[in-house]
Image (cartoon, coloured by chain):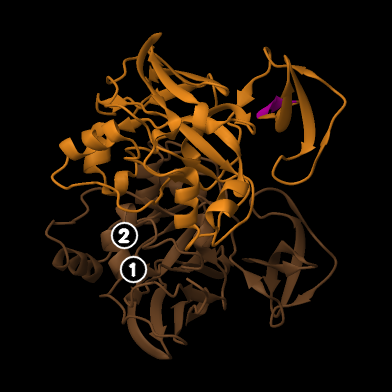
Chain colours: A brown, B orange
Amino acid sequence: MRWCRFEHKNASSFGIIEDDKIIPVAGSPFGSYERLKTRVSLARAKLLAPVDKPIFYATSRNYRKNLQDSIGRSNRIFAMAEPWAGYRAASAITGPDADVVIPSDCPDDVYFQGEIVVVIGKKARHLTHDGARDAIFGYTIGNDVTCDTWATTDTRSWRGKNVDTWKPLGPWIETELDVDKAMCRVRYNGQELVGWNINQWYFSPADVLVAITRYITVNPGDILMMGTEGVRSPYVKHGDQVEVEVSGLGTLRNRFVKSVDWY
Amino acid sequence: MRWCRFEHKNASSFGIIEDDKIIPVAGSPFGSYERLKTRVSLARAKLLAPVDKPIFYATSRNYRKNLQDSIGRSNRIFAMAEPWAGYRAASAITGPDADVVIPSDCPDDVYFQGEIVVVIGKKARHLTHDGARDAIFGYTIGNDVTCDTWATTDTRSWRGKNVDTWKPLGPWIETELDVDKAMCRVRYNGQELVGWNINQWYFSPADVLVAITRYITVNPGDILMMGTEGVRSPYVKHGDQVEVEVSGLGTLRNRFVKSVDWY
């Protein structure tokens, strides 16, 4: 099943995608819902990020080449002995096909990372591995946009990863994805930069959910970004297009623009 | 005006406090609302944290003694040349008079920091100082509970500051507080540990809001914790009570308990 969020009658609505149509619902996939009678053309709909103001967990250094890249750039060894997750800010989320805006005073070293994103379906704490697998509602795609300078110089990367629009998510949530068979591919202006088997991660979503729910309650609609593979992307230029494709799920496509506003 | 959130008819409701009564409202202080006809006894109500799933900004090292303490414990100089704010997780928020629960596998060095918390009332980006002052809806009180070991060893303090219940907030939002005249006092089992003039901060709420809204959109109901003064508190023991009082606002009171659950 594919769940989206989209602009509908000047508001946002959840919807179920069937073929080339969206069936709007009253309610939410994370609570109760009712299919409405109308149908909306998927091609013409403006899709939004498929979750609304989640708690946004993110693990990283979860693939071999990405870990090697982190180690090479640091004077510390960042091997992750235990699963864990930090945070991104929900305020930075934007939707598929939306512009990622780089403020005009931003250093010229913004890069991107395609990742698969777990969508949580249950309120849970103290999950077991079986429970964690049951608590996964589905998967979507994310792009972890980062300014290299700010991520290094800022206290806790406060801007470095969390500028408005720097966390594109979408295009929808797929609830039936066989993640063990799925590939993730990242394309930069149409050219493939990297592709990997998603399940080559060091820690699976269940590993991370077991670890964080020892201390933290997760809730329906919260999300967990699983990390990327491959070395750093090129630094983006105005007008660049980035696509993150997950086989069996879809493609998250966004354009980068440099702001010419007064800052 | 004093706004609270409280348990009402098996749900949560916002309410206005007048004398010893709560006037429940339909709606929210951050949108439109209507006063209901019923009245609820404040003394008997179960108050909740006065905001619901905010984006939770936090600045720190914002007072002289606290900054000196940070410098002394680090091999880096942490003087803050520019205002900034990192994040806490909304999942860690609990209410006034609620227990702060320390997991049984948690190292024995959990401390607390009383702070004033700004509640944002407007959706805004690119705020000026005047605009930032207008965007402040009111103030509440917070306690930034931290595990010293985890905050040091964890990647990005993921557990160190964000275990469930480690961010008590309340007891309510005061919209008329004259913050330039307010004192904050922290009491530990009834004994005062520290008291300070809130406006002795290096950076005011307007300074921080101007800085973060260059890059980030803030929204009604989001919060900004302003940092604490004074050196580190004692490490808590089971049964300890901590009170954070802000003159002209109220007192946030919480008990610490060590969990005996299976973890």
A230 left or right of B103 in image: left
Q: Which mark is residue A60?
A: 2
Where residue A154 appears, x then y in whole percent?
A: 31, 57
Task: Please report contact status of discs 2 and 1: CB closer than 8 Å, yes or no.
Answer: yes
Q: Residues within 10 Å of mark 1 (few under 14, many from 20)?
A: many
Q: Which residue is mark 1?
A: A228
Q: Residues within 10 Å of mark 2 (few under 14, many from 20)?
A: many
Task: Give the CA distance from mark 2 to mark 1.
Answer: 7 Å
As shown in the figure, which amino acid type bears the numbered disc 2? Ser
Most common SS among magenta residues? strand
In this view, the residue farthest toward the bottom is: A190
Q: Is residue B234 visible?
A: yes
Q: Which mark is residue B201?
A: none
Magenta-drawn segment: B4-8
A52 left or right of A42 in image: left
Where residue B243 appears, x then y in whole percent?
A: 45, 17
Location of residue B4 by image quarter: top right
In depth, the one of A242 and B148 nearer the eye is B148
As shown in the figure, which amino acid type bears the numbered disc 1? Thr
Where residue A150 appears, x then y in whole percent?
A: 32, 64
**Residue B208 inside the magenta-drawn segment:** no
To which chain does the residue with label 1 belong? A
To which chain does the residue with label 2 belong? A
Residue at x-position 55% and y-position 58%: B127
In depth, the one of A19 and B4 nearer the eye is B4
Q: How many marks?
A: 2
